[in-house]
Image (spheres, rainbow, N blue to C red):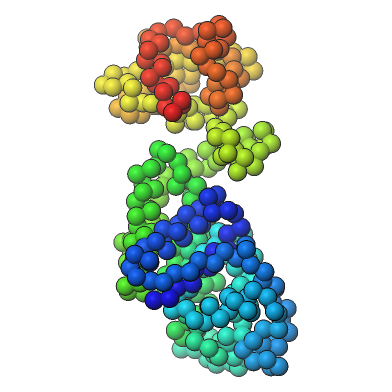
Amino acid sequence: MKVLAVNSGPRPDKESYTVMLLNLLVEGMREAGAEVEVVNLREKKIRNCIGCFTCWTKTPGRCLHKDDMTLELFPKFLASDLIIYATPLYFHTINAALAAFMERTLPAALPFFEEGEDGKTFHPMRYQVPPSVLLSVCGFPEASEFDAMLEFFERTRHGEARPVAAICRAGASLLSVPQLGAKAREVFDATKQAGRELVYNMQIAPETLARITQPLGDAKTFGKMGNIYWKTCIAEGVTPKEFDDKKMVPRPQTLDDFMFVFPYGLNTSAAGDRKVRLQFHFSGDISDSCFFAIEKGRADAEQGTCEKPDLIIETPFGLWMDVLTRKADGQKLFMDGKYKVQGDLALMMKLFQKDSD
C-alpha cells in the first residue's frame, strides 16, 4: 500500500499534537508493510485556487499554477492508495493550508453534473482519487467540536474517493499531562494499532477508535486549568511555546485557583497510610486560610481551618505563589524567615518532592 500523509499543521514537529498522533499512525502503517511518505505543507509553496477553471477547459486535468502542488504533490496524490489529511481544528474545520491543498485537487474532477444514489449532485472524477483518512486534534474537551469538520469530509465522498476513517482527538493538550500518563499511553498504542488496521482492512475497528478518543478528563476541570494557564501566559507575557520552553507552572491568582492547582504538584503517596492535614494561612494581598486533606493518593481542598493539622504553613500569598511557580527558592526563603512552618518538616519535604522532580 502506498500512502501519502499530508500534514497541514504550522508548528514544528516537537510542538504539534497533530504530528504527535500522525507519527504514531504512520509508525503503525509502516509496521504493517505500507510505504508512507509524510509531506509537511508548511514547507511547500501552494498557491490558492483562483477559480479560473483552466484545469477543466484549456488544460484538462492540469492546473495553470506552476508550484509544488502541480509539479510534485498532485501527481503523488493521484499515485497513492490512501491519503491521510492531518490538520489541527481551526474555527471548527480544517486549517487554511489543508484547504488550499484540497481545493487544488480540483483538476481530478470533471466539470459535469451527475446525481448520486443519495439524490445529491456531484462532479464525476477525471482520475481515480484515493480514499482518505482524517486525523485532527483540538484544544476543546468536547468531541462535538469536530462536527462541522466531519460533515465537510463526508461531503467529499465521490464513489470510491471516500473518507474511510476519522480520528478526532479532543483535549489533545491533556496527552502531555504527567498525571494522565497511563491514559495517554493507551491513546498512543491505539493510534499505532489504527495504522495497522488501515493497512490490513482499510478501516479502523470501533473499539480501537474508542480507545483513541476516550475522555481524558471532565470538561469543567479542563476549562478551569486552561483558564489559569492562559491567565499566566498573559500576565507573564509569554506564548505557549515560551511557557513550555521555560518549564513554567500555571500561577494561581486567587485562593480558589490555588486550592484547585496545588494538589497536582503534591506527592500524595508520601502520606502513606496516614491521613495528613496540611494547613495554609495566607497574608498580604490575599489574607485567608485553606487546608488539604491528603489520604489514599488524593488531596482534597477546603477553605478555612482544620483541627489538629500535621503541617502549618504561614506565608504571604504572593510569596508562596513564587515558590509554587519556581520563581523563588522555597528552601532559601524558609531559611531567611520569609515564611513559617510548624510540624513535620521531613513530611513536608516528601510531599513537595514532586515539585522538584
- Tell me the quarter of the image containing the N terminus: bottom left
Q: Position of residue 242 (x, y in %)?
A: 62, 40
Give the vertical position of 222 relative to 77 (above or below).
above
Residue sitting nearer the eye, 289 or 192: 192
At which x and y percent is residue 177? Answer: 45, 41
Residue 118 in sight: no
Indicate the position of residue 217 as horizontal and vertical percent values: 42, 44
Q: Residue at x 55, y 21 (%)?
A: 323
Question: With 156 as the anchor, is 25 left or right in this view?
Answer: left
Q: Is residue 334 above or below residue 35?
A: above
Q: Where does the image place residue 14, in percent across and percent down from the top left?
A: 53, 50
Quarter of the image where one finds residue 265: top left
Side of 170 where 98 appears, left or right: right
Point out the residue furthest to the left here: 273
Residue 210 appears in which quarter of the rendering? Answer: bottom left
Kindly tell me whether residue 127 is visible in this rendering.
yes
Residue shown at the point (64%, 92%) measured from the top left: 60
Q: Residue at x 28, y 22 (%)?
A: 272
> Count of labels shown?
0
Q: Is residue 85 above or below residue 125?
A: above
* Quarter that holds the C terminus: top left
Q: Nearer the viewer, residue 50 or 209?
A: 50
| Residue found at x 44% / y 69% | 36
Relative to 268, say whether 93 is above or below: below
